[in-house]
Image: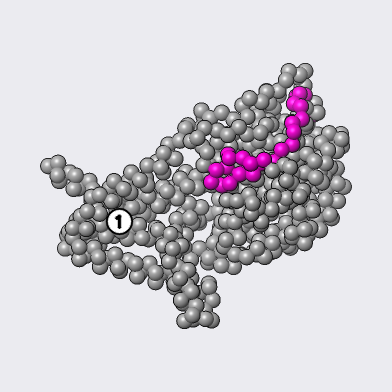
């Protein structure tokens, strides 16, 4: 009886682990960018695929359960490990094919190579397992049960079962406002922070992108904005940059369980210090998102968000899974993701942000606009763009330049920024026209562009490009320049604004800048002395 139970368990767990490993592994490795509820549909579809394959092999192997389970698990692992196989084998295969077909274009060649490579490997594996019965039993009972389950699934399950959200402290829980005379909310202005992701400083745009952004800056000045022309970012990753700014202090690296992702900073962005200071004064915390999981604030008092269009839509998790398979090339022809992103950006600037600003209640508004950051979906006149041969992804820096030449980034960024400038000015005009209360508006880049940023190497990164960000501030009394100075960083913007206009007492900190990699985002390296060289 025990032997039958063990045999049945291994036969079930082999294929099941081969399915769970890529699905949960993809999510756990990208958990700071993917929503947890996006796992359901891939798991259901994968389960149906597993049952279908298992039934097919059970029939074709004359009802041999060991062979059926082994073949099902092998095919699933090969199918979802296709990206790894290509990384090892494809360069040589592609070079050989280029000799045979010198006029073949990469866009046509790639799918053929991908599918033929998978079919060849699958046939080899099938032939081996059909002939070697003992090997099939061994792999079923040992590798797929213990190796795949314990070696691959456990890290993913640990990631899924992280510390409950409610128990997390903020990144700067030690920051406290000194006692001050409380001010009635009726005398306080609204605070609006508009983050234009990856928006660089004028000198960087001129040097690397050939853009003269002076006309846009002049238009901002006509609308009462002070431009800090020597501003720079504190961090180069969005969750870190915004968490530190909104919590009014530099980030203390969290416990080891968080050292490989920015989950900690995402939580502290949602429950930020500015929100906590203004809530007793009757302020609402309002969020205007554009679909980025990293900057979601699920506990905000109000969310002004575009409703997802009807019809079938692939989630980010599903796209990442498809990219691991031979079917990934199909994403090059998918346009709905680019259309949805374009629609979210326009809705945020044209409708949601002005609507949030028009509310009569005291409010702190956080609008995160994922532009001019990739994906590049706008031309300079607002015409739709579909990057040729690219699947939809928000990756930039080396995640972008490894897929194509720098000139694609340079042109796409410049074109999108030109149109973004127009939409931002229109939004600001609407906000200022319909304002029901005095307003402090902070318009900033969380960091600069990242065309020349290496996610793994500080030495290979142009730190001036990635740290030099846009910073423009409008205040009710028009004295932002005297308050902030030319070299301000985001962390001091809000400390000084809260002190001057909201009755707090938060002294200015030293302006520092820190580089960190994606792999270890909290292993900070100070680069302040090197900036400007």
Residue 531 horizontal side relative to residue 45, left or right: right
Q: Which residue is mark 1?
A: 73
Residue 417 horizontal side relative to residue 405, left or right: right
Image location (x, y in percent) of residue 47: 33, 52
- Residue 141 appears in the rendering: yes
Image location (x, y in percent) of residue 357: 73, 39
Residue 164 horizontal side relative to residue 415, left or right: left
Please say whether residue 513 is one of the residues in the magenta stretch.
yes
Residue 521, located in which quarter of the rendered image? Answer: top right
- State the residue at coordinates (71%, 52%): 465
Q: Main secondary structure of the magenta part?
A: loop
Placement of 527 over or under 176, stated as above or below: below
- State the residue at coordinates (78%, 36%): 440
* Quadrant placement of the N terminus: top left
Q: Which residue is more in the foreground, 6 or 62?
A: 6
Image location (x, y in percent) of residue 161: 42, 36
Q: Which residue is more in the foreground, 192 or 199?
A: 199
Residue 176, located in which quarter of the rendered image? Answer: top right
Placement of 513 over or under 42, stated as above or below: above
Q: Which residue is more in the foreground, 252 or 436?
A: 252
The magenta region covers: 501-526
């Amino acid at each position: 009886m025990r032997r039958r139970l063990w045999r049945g368990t291994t036969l079930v767990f082999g294929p099941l682990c081969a399915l769970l490993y890529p699905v949960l592994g993809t999510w756990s490795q990208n958990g700071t960018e993917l929503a947890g509820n996006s796992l359901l549909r891939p798991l259901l579809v994968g389960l149906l695929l597993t049952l279908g394959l298992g039934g097919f092999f059970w029939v074709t192997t004359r009802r041999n359960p060991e062979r059926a389970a082994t073949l099902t698990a092998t095919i699933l692992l090969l199918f979802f490990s296709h990206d790894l196989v290509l990384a090892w084998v494809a360069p040589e295969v592609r070079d050989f094919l280029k000799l045979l077909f010198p006029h073949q274009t990469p866009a046509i060649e790639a799918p053929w190579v991908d599918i033929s490579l998978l079919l060849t490997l699958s046939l080899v594996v099938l032939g081996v397992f059909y002939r070697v019965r003992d090997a099939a039993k061994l792999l079923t009972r040992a590798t797929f049960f213990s190796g795949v389950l314990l070696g691959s699934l456990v890290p993913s399950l640990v990631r899924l079962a992280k510390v409950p959200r409610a128990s997390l402290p903020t990144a700067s829980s030690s920051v406290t406002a000194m006692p001050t005379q409380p001010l009635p909310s009726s005398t306080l202005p609204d605070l609006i922070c508009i983050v234009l992701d990856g928006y660089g400083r004028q000198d960087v745009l001129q040097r690397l992108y050939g853009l003269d952004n002076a006309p846009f800056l002049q238009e901002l000045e006509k609308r009462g904005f002070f431009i800090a022309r020597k501003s720079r970012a504190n961090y180069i990753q969005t969750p870190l940059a915004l968490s530190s700014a909104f919590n009014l202090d530099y980030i203390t690296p969290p416990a080891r369980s968080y050292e490989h992702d920015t989950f900690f900073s995402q939580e502290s962005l949602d429950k930020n210090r500015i929100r906590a200071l203004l809530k007793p004064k009757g302020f609402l915390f309002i969020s205007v998102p554009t679909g980025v999981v990293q900057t979601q604030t699920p506990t905000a008092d109000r969310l002004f968000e575009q409703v997802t269009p009807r019809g079938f839509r692939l989630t980010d998790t599903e796209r990442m899974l498809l990219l691991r398979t031979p079917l990934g090339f199909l994403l090059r022809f998918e346009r709905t993701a680019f259309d949805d992103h374009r629609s979210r950006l326009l809705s945020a600037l044209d409708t949601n942000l002005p609507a949030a600003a028009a509310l009569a209640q005291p409010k702190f508004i956080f609008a995160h606009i994922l532009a001019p950051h990739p994906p590049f979906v706008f031309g300079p006149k607002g015409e739709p763009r579909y990057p040729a041969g690219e699947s939809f992804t928000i990756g930039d820096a080396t995640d972008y330049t490894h897929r194509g030449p720098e000139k694609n980034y340079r042109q796409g960024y410049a074109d999108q920024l030109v149109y973004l400038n127009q939409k931002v000015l229109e939004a600001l005009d609407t906000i200022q026209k319909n304002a029901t209360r005095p307003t402090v508006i902070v318009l900033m880049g969380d960091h600069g562009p990242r065309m020349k940023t290496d996610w793994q190497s500080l030495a290979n990164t142009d730190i001036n490009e990635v740290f030099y960000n846009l910073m423009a501030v409008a205040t009710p009394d028009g004295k932002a320049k005297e308050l902030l100075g030319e070299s301000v960083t985001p962390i001091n913007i809000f400390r000084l604004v809260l002190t001057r206009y909201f009755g707090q007492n938060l002294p200015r900190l030293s302006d520092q800048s820190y580089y960190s990699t994606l792999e270890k985002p909290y292993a900070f390296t100070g680069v302040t002395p090197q900036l400007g060289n």
